[in-house]
Image (cartoon, rainbow, N blue to C red):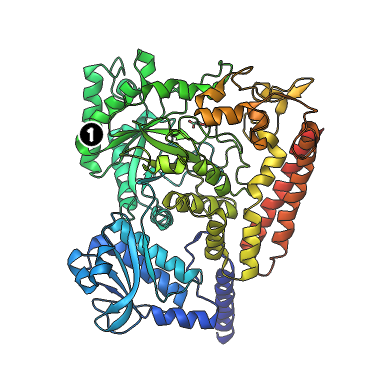
Amino acid sequence: MRALRAMFTTVLLVVAGLAARGEDGYEAWLRYRPIDDPARLEYCRTYCREIVISSPSREWDAATRELVRGLSGLLDRRVAVLGAPTQSGAVILLVKRSDLSLLSVDERERVRIAEGFIILSTQVEGKSVTVISAETQRGLLYGVFHFLRLVATGEPLEGLSISQQPAMPLRMINHWDNLNGVVERGYAGRSIFRWDQLPIGDSRYTDYARMLASVGINAIAVNNVNAAVEVLRSDMLEKAAVLAEHFREYGITLYLSVNFASPMRLGGLSTADPADPAVQGWWKAKAAEIYRLIPDFGGFLVKANSEGQPGPLDYGRTHAEGANMLGRALAPHGGSVIWRAFVYNPRMADRAMESYREFAPLDGRFDANVAVQIKNGPIDFQIREPVHPLFGQLARTNTVLELQITQEYTGRSTHLVYLVPTWKEVLDFDTYTAGRGTTVSRVIAGRVFPYRICGMAGVSNVGQERNWTGHHFAAANLYGYGRLAWDPELSAESIAEEWARLTWGNDPVVVRTVVDMLLPSAAIYEKYTSPLGVGVLCNGNHYDPRPASREYFHHADGLGVGFDRTRRSGSGYTQQYHAVNTRRFDSRATCPEELLLFFHHVPYTYRLKSGKTVIQHIYDTHYEGVEEARGLLEKWLALEGRVNPQRHREVRLRLEAQIAHAEKWREEING
Ligand code: GCU
């Protein structure tokens, strides 16, 4: 019996040991592992002795719970929640206007920010405390997550005087998840949304909401833009209401993607013409039904007259007429319509031109509760393409930027590609439309034109994989997307470092290495898949090389390569930009070299600034790219023993697969 007990104990110990070592990535950047440096641990404990919530109510529950969870984990001891501070070192959540009397007049002034927060080191009732304060549920959550980030990443906790607010009002995630669980362009397993199980909830929804809120996301569309009409069926709406509840707790508003033909296919009407009163009535009734179930419903995301989807153009109406009809159904309830501008005609000589052509003339014709959501570039989420010409040209149309977090054309979840630097380039692009400095980021933040709805939407890379994103490093893109939407001024490097510390711990060698892997990774991928902006060279799966099938994009012939989009000899696409950019792109001399083949058809012997010919450059970059991908693996191997073994192994396997696939690209192109 004693032997049996001893054996049982051993087994338990082994299991416990495995659990401690076997971190699987589920906690992503919200790991809250005990701080391992004793001096730092002691320091943090001094500043976080107790948590005080001035006016407890359900509204602040999630923030309070997170603070308890985070601090208890990081400080390796339970931190009590009290109603008033009993000692110096309390962290106080001040949430009610009346409670603010505890602060000085100056300090109080700083709290007037809708979704923002302040974090102050101050004195309350004679005690030195840290105050986290906000006006709204969201603000308080963001403040708490920010404070936890400071603790977890080794930042000072004394003398704090932080006040932040999000740069843009809409910080949204779009899921391309079908109701049957298959995710379009998803590489991390099936959908996390279990419509077959709903309305039964799932703790995974809450953990996902926590992750999103921790980086400031405040809106989510949970189903594919290629929308099934069934999502608007009454039983499905009841399920959606349960999702909305999970997200609401974390300040995230639910949207649904809808199919423009729903009145016909679901409602049995003979038309979906937006001018038809019966159609309008159907949408109005549907909106009312939704708001009965989800009082804070955000609205509809719509892909119309794009890639075979139905839309107003089917009835001779414009995008604006279609969008406004939906907008008017939602308006009485405070909802909005996000109408996508991703339209093209595959038979056009230059499909890059279509979106601008259809939408630019409609500026000013969309209702106030309608926004147009525009992909970052005119083609389709390539590793390199110019910024979409519509940005900055819709002075009277709410504008949202759409980015793709899921790596459809950028290596799925096999290739390590940190997309933040590429997004930064988009955000920093100067459209010149309202003078120098009319950057995309200022436009979508509503700082150039008086937009009511504006911001960013990112196509999710999350699925049912235990670590959410498949590749552990792909989580850096989800993290970085949120951080950039909060503050586009953050550098790609600082975001990478934060993520590295939160995800892999504060060992300086690990942090340096992870950052050094992330930062050049997009450029590496570009080298072996699409140098000089040559564009789509993959096959229909958007992953494997097949340049022979992509003549439409690269225009390679016996003498040269590249798509002439210039004004004088090409498609004229360059004219869709403001004149400053038209001139820059039109001339080979001033066109950024990384976009040369997007805008120009040049002989293979054309000399680049490096002195190399185009053909030599293409050849060399494929070799360099593969070598640099090998370098990523080498860096990672050096971390063995410094990061937990399970995640180390999983990343190693993906890096090995990346190298093999990069070689495949090189062989296909270089022959
Ligand atoms: C791309 C992608 C599609 C997606 C479409 C869209 O073309 O390959 O899967 O539906 O974009 O953004 O609507």
Is residue 47 something one can see in this rendering? yes
Outermost residue on the top side: it is 316
Q: Residue at x 71, y 48 (%)?
A: 657
| Residue nearest the viewer, comparing 498 with 252 | 498
Say if 314 sits above or below 394 in the image: above
**Is 295 left or right of 459, judged from the image as shown?**
left
The residue under label 1 is: 331
Amino acid at the residue labelled 1: Ala
- x then y, percent, for residue 252: 34, 50
Please tell me in which quadrant of the rendered image residue 548 appears: top right
Report whether 587 appears left or right of 434. right
Q: Where is 333 relative to 512, above or below?
A: above
Q: Residue at x 25, y 33 (%)?
A: 330
Q: Quadrant of residue 536?
A: top right
Q: Position of residue 35 (x, y in %)?
A: 51, 75
Quarter holding the C terminus is top right
Residue 229, image x, y percentages: 36, 28
Is residue 310 visible to us here?
no
- At horizontal 39% and vertical 72% (from top left) the residue drawn is 160
Q: Is residue 424 left or right of residue 652?
A: left
Extreme-left residue of the structure? 98
Q: Residue furthest bottom?
A: 2
Q: Residue at x 31, y 61 (%)?
A: 140
Give neighbour class at mark 1: few <14, some 14-19, many 20+ (Cα, 10 Å): some
| Front in this rendered view, residue 311 or 421 | 421
Above or below, 553 relative to 1: above
Q: Quadrant of the N terminus?
A: bottom right
Image coords of residue 131 (percent x, y)? 31, 71
Give the quarter of the image for residue 365.
top left
Is 609 or 270 nearer to us in this picture? Answer: 609
* Residue in the foreground of this view, choosing between 171 and 599: 599
Q: Secondary structure at mark 1?
A: helix
